[in-house]
Image (cartoon, grey):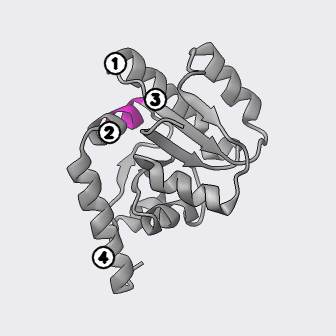
Amino acid sequence: ISDEYIFYPAQLWHHKDHITVIKALKILRDEYRLNIMLVLSGDKFSSSKDIFNLVDKYKLNNQVQYLGKVSFKNLVALYNQAQFLITATLYESSSLPVLEAIATKTAIIASNTLPNIEMTKNLSLNLFQAKDPDSLAKAINNIWHNDLLRKKQTEENQQKIIEGVV
């Protein structure tokens, strides 16, 4: 795996909205001239065919690496090595990947679902408009080269864990 990548650990279901992430990668490549590796983990489900067809259509095969289901040890390593976690879900009651990212000191870009918005009361998350690939591309572009911002956010989130706020 490339030294620099976005990590999206999520089953390939429609509500996880990998499609918006793939479209944002295309925008980043075509409009921002930024070729970013996306690493996906999770089992194949109802959205698999659509995701892989879109990767092929946009010629992003060299930027998207699908690992399938990974062991816990590999999952932790993927979080630790990622530039940041992305979660583009359209709905869920809470986000375990966000908490896992915080535990592994990984910065987070998340869709603006109600649970994620609520988490920003105590945590440093970079939100984007759900189902909006332009909004996601802008969020990624803003944080991709900003090591100081990512470090500040991960340190703030770690402190919140220590304080028991999360």
Assess disc 3: are there few (<14), some (14-19) or many (≥20) residues with their C-alpha within 10 Å of its C-alpha. many
Q: Give the mark nearer the N terminus: 3 vs 2.
A: 3
Q: Which residue is mark 3?
A: 24
Residue 88 in view here:
no
Determine the main secondary structure of the stretch shown in magenta: helix
Which residue was labeled with disc 1? 33
Q: Verify CB contact (< 8 Å) between mark 1 and mark 2.
A: no
Q: Nearer the viewer, mark 1 or mark 3?
A: 1
Q: Amino acid at mark 3?
A: Ala
Does the magenta portion include 147?
A: no
Element under label 4? helix
Find the magenta span and give its range: 134-139
Which residue is labeled 2 in the image? 144
Distance Cα–Cα, label 3 vs label 4:
31 Å
Classify mark 1: helix, strand or loop. loop
Pointer 4 with pointer 2, Cβ within 8 A:
no
Instruction: Give neighbour class at mark 1: few <14, some 14-19, many 20+ (Cα, 10 Å).
Output: few
Work out which quarter of the rendered image holds the N terminus and state it. Answer: top right
Tag 3–tag 4 contact (CB < 8 Å):
no
Q: Is residue 46 left or right of residue 129?
A: right
Whole-number angstrom distance, CA of label 1 to CA of label 3: 12 Å
> Which tag, 1 or 4, sits closer to the chain's start?
1
- The quadrant holding residue 61 is top right
Under mark 1, the amino acid is: Arg
Q: Is residue 70 visible?
A: yes
